[in-house]
Image: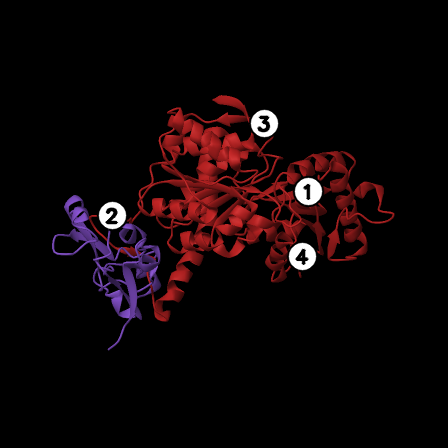
Amino acid sequence: MIPYDKLPHTPIASVNSVVVKTGAWRTFKPVINYEKCIRCMICWKFCPDVSIRLEDGSSYPAQSERIKETIKEAPVIDYDHCKGCGICAEECPTKAIEMVPEEK
Amino acid sequence: MVRMLLTGNKTTAYSAMRSRVQVVSAYPITPQTTIVEHIAEFIADGLMKAEYIQVESEHSAMAAAIAASNTGARAFTATSAHGLLLMHEMLHWATGARLPVVMVNVNRALGPPWSVWADHLDSISQRDTGWMQYYVENNQEIFDTVIMAYKVSERPDIMLPSMISQDAFYLSHTVEPVDIVEQEVVDNYLPPYDPPYRLDVNNPAGFGSLVMPNHYYEFRYKIAEAMEKAKKYIKEAAEEWYEITGRDYRGLLDCYRCEDADVVLFGAGTMMSTAKEVVDWMRAEGKKVGVARIRVFRPFPGEDVRKVADGAAAIGVMDRAYGFGRGGAFFNEVNSALYNHRNRPPTKNYIIGLGGRDVKPRHIRAIFNDLLKVKDEGLDEEFRWFGLRRENMPEEEI
């Protein structure tokens, strides 16, 4: 126990959420069907938990070859931190993201 | 000294300018709107250097002020009535995260019935959020109090937010002469904000994070302790401001001719200026009356209330708000300060001026006469809705 006068004014967590894997809270996981993805990045923009990264898109398919040539990045879900809220699936204009039940 | 003719709202904008506020989050609501409009003009004209964030709601306005404060910036916002209510969740956050945000609230009635006029229920409803609360009686006091509030809030051993409430229209839209103290004088009084910890991308950390029951209690105690300590610092800040300006805010309770008064009337805001005037008139008639204006409501000046009670034979409390179920908040707090005190004169609550109804000198005179009757004959009733429209109401209540 820390005495009250040795505590800071407000709790300060030095272990931040990069380390805390909140992905374990998920009951549904978003899965991107890259065949339908037009690289609009709306999912990346809307993700409330910064759990969609933009990575080199060369190894992922896209809706067309022209899209792949024009936009070099692709959205990739960070399953260590995604809590499965489904906002990305809801916002995706081409319905390229499906929410799949987590099963073990 | 620069003396200007200013509305309460423009005075508020000048107080933010002179406090060298660095971030202003703004969302409009009557009668606050012109505060943030004037600040926007100051920034656009290059008179003030600050980030101005237009947000989509008052909840966001407070969230933005909190985040800005957390990075180590001096943050300011202003609101009224329903806007303040929408901020409620974030008001608690500012306190728990120990962020010295300063906000001006233009006291406005809550609807329905829809009303944009003066009433204290909006800020009274935020009593337990852990914000320091000041109630002012004129435009000069707005300017002075915003600057003093930053001084107190930003002390490393306080780190609590402050709310300064001014009455809708009586101050917000009324022009009065105001001394806008020179920038270098304010700079000497109010040093830049330098918090003991801040959000920093080079040293990432989470603030206000989860604690278990074995420490939550201690964090709450620390807020209580800081709030109690603030009483001393509010007086010190006022003492220093008095030495510079000659204007006296050294009491949490602003007592006017209380020392030898038989009856003392408590209350807050602009109607207390009227009450002071009436005190002079009645004193000239030989009636020993006095006024105690609650300038600081949080932390509550309980010790000062007890001092007043030691000399008074009856106490009245005017509330410009009603707590449904059990009287006005000022009345209840004055009573609670007195219950464990040896001297407990009878106390009576006058509910008055709700929704901007004028509180006139003849009303105050009638209340003082009623209190003198309480002193001689004892308490007749605890709560009186003064000026309630009814058949055969006495002339002095109209």
Circles 1 and 2 on the same subunit: yes
Residue B375, image x and y in percent? Answer: 77, 52
Image disc number at residue B176: 3
Q: Which three-letter amino acid code belongs to the residue tagged 4?
A: Gly
The answer for which chain carries disc 4 is B
In the displayed structure, does residue B289 sit left or right of residue A2? Answer: right
* Helix, strand or loop under label 3: strand
Q: Are marks 2 and 4 on the same chain?
A: yes
Structural distance between the alpha carbons of marks 2 and 4: 47 Å
> How many angstroms separate mark 2 from mark 3 (CA)?
43 Å
On the image, numbered disc 4 is attached to which residue? B327
Q: Quadrant of residue A47?
A: bottom left
Dot 1 or dot 2: first in sequence order is 2
- Residue at image point 79% right, 43% down: B397
Q: Colour of chain A?
A: purple
Q: Which residue is mark 1?
A: B290
Where the C terminus of chain B falls, by quadrant?
top right
Report the residue marked by disc 2.
Answer: B200
Q: Is residue B309 visible?
A: yes
